[in-house]
Image (tube, rainbow, N blue to C red):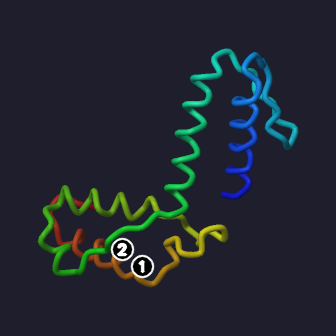
């Protein structure tokens, strides 16, 4: 994550300091050709927010009793949200949750067990 944010900082700096530029040097042998610097800055800002949000992925886990009360559609949506967690912990964000965390594993197992009892769900 830190490498991605460093590249974003370089791009933002070059966009802010060189208004008439055609190429942006991103480091690591990577260059961007820019036709619309304002649009690129907007996209870079969105990407930066996405990276930061992804590294701090947190979720209020529901108890088994709360999960049972959800209808099947909501339970499937909850499972989809659980699946967005990273497979391994992020070294740059030690407080981030991953699929390796015992709490995540327990909630996921509960969701699967409940879904197995529902009709029309495989």
Q: Residues within 10 Å of mark 1 (few under 14, many from 20)?
A: some
Numbered mark located on residue 108 in the image: 2
Quadrant including the C terminus: bottom left
**In the rendering, at what x and y percent does residue 99 appear?**
49, 72
Read off the residue under disc 1.
Answer: 105
26 vs 40, left or right, is: right
User: Which quadrant of the structure image shows residue 52?
Assistant: bottom right
Numbered mark located on residue 76 in the image: none
93 or 110: which is nearer to us? 93
84 vs 113, left or right, is: right
- Up/down of 66 relative to 52, above or below: below
Disc 1 is placed on an element classified as helix
- Up/down of 29 relative to 69, above or below: above
119 vs 46, left or right, is: left
Residue at horizontal 32 percent and vertical 71 percent from the top = 60
Residue furthest right in the image: 29
52 or 100: which is nearer to us? 52
**In the rendering, at what x and y percent does residue 115 appear?**
23, 68
- Up/down of 120 relative to 29, above or below: below
**In the rendering, at what x and y percent does residue 104 appear?**
41, 76
Mark 2 and mark 1 residues within 8 Å of each other at the beta carbon: yes
Q: CA distance from mark 2 to mark 1?
A: 5 Å
Residue at horizontal 53 percent and vertical 64 percent from the top = 86
80 or 47: which is nearer to us? 47
**In the rendering, at what x and y percent does residue 105 appear?**
42, 79
Q: Residues within 10 Å of mark 2 (few under 14, many from 20)?
A: some
Residue at horizontal 66 percent and vertical 57 percent from the top = 1
């Amino acid at each position: 994550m830190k490498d991605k944010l460093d590249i974003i900082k370089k791009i933002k700096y070059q966009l802010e300091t060189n208004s008439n530029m055609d190429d942006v040097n991103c480091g690591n042998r990577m260059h961007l050709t820019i036709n619309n610097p304002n649009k690129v800055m907007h996209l870079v800002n969105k990407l930066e927010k996405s990276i930061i949000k992804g590294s701090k992925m947190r979720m209020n886990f529901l108890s088994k009793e709360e999960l049972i009360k959800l209808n099947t559609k909501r339970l499937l949506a909850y499972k989809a949200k659980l699946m967005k967690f990273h497979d391994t912990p992020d070294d740059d964000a030690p407080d981030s949750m991953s699929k390796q965390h015992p709490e995540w594993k327990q909630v996921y197992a509960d969701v699967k067990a409940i879904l197995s009892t529902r009709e029309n769900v495989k």
